[in-house]
C-alpha cells in the first residue's frame, strides 16, 4: 500500500512540472542511486513475476513515456520504499 502513496506523491509532483522527462529522469536517478543497471532491473522484474525483454526496458526508459504500472513495478523490484521528490531538478531552458 505504501508504494501507492509514494506514487500519488510522484503524480502530484509531476502535475506541477510541465516537463515530460521527469518520470524518465526519476526512474534513471533511482536506478543510479541503487547501482542498478537495465540488465539488473530486468532480472529484478523477472524475480517479481514480470516478463520484459532488455530491449523493451531500454526502450521504455529511453522514451520516458512508460505507464504508471511499469514505474510502480520497477520501484517495487528495486525495493524502493522511500523517494525524495525534492531532489528532482528541472531546467526550463
Image (cartoon, helix red, strand yellow):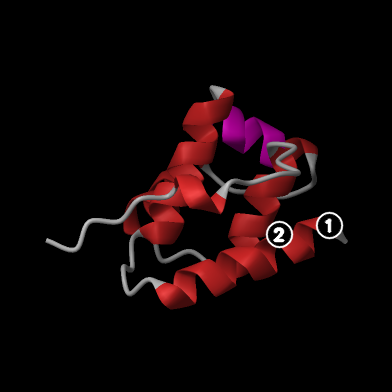
Q: Residue at x 57, y 71 (%)?
A: 11
Residue tagged by mark 2? Answer: 6
**Residue 56 colored in magenta in the image:** no
Q: Residue at x 54, y 22 (%)?
A: 35
Q: Position of residue 72 (x, y in %)?
A: 67, 57
Instruction: Label 1, secondary structure: give it.
Output: helix
Kindly indicate the quadrant of the structure image that contains residue 55: top left
Asked if the residues shown at circle 1 and circle 2 are in contact, with their CB atoms under 8 angstroms apart, the answer is yes
Magenta-tinted stretch = 39-45
Q: Is residue 3 visible?
A: yes
Q: Main secondary structure of the magenta part?
A: helix
Q: Position of residue 46 (x, y in %)?
A: 71, 39
Residue tagged by mark 1? Answer: 2
Q: Quadrant of the N terminus?
A: bottom right
Q: Position of residue 70 (x, y in %)?
A: 60, 59
Q: Residue at x 33, y 60 (%)?
A: 21
Q: State left or right for residue 77 relative to residue 31.
A: right
Q: Residue furthest left?
A: 93
Amino acid at each position: 500500500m505504501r508504494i501507492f502513496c509514494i506514487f500519488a506523491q510522484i503524480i502530484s509532483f509531476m502535475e506541477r512540472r510541465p516537463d515530460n522527462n521527469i518520470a524518465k529522469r526519476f526512474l534513471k536517478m533511482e536506478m543510479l542511486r541503487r547501482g542498478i543497471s537495465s540488465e539488473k532491473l530486468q532480472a529484478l522484474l523477472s524475480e517479481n513475476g514480470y516478463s520484459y525483454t532488455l530491449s523493451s526496458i531500454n526502450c521504455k526508459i529511453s522514451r520516458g513515456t512508460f505507464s504508471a504500472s511499469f514505474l510502480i513495478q520497477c520501484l517495487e523490484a528495486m525495493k524502493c520504499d522511500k523517494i525524495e521528490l525534492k531532489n528532482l531538478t528541472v531546467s526550463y531552458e
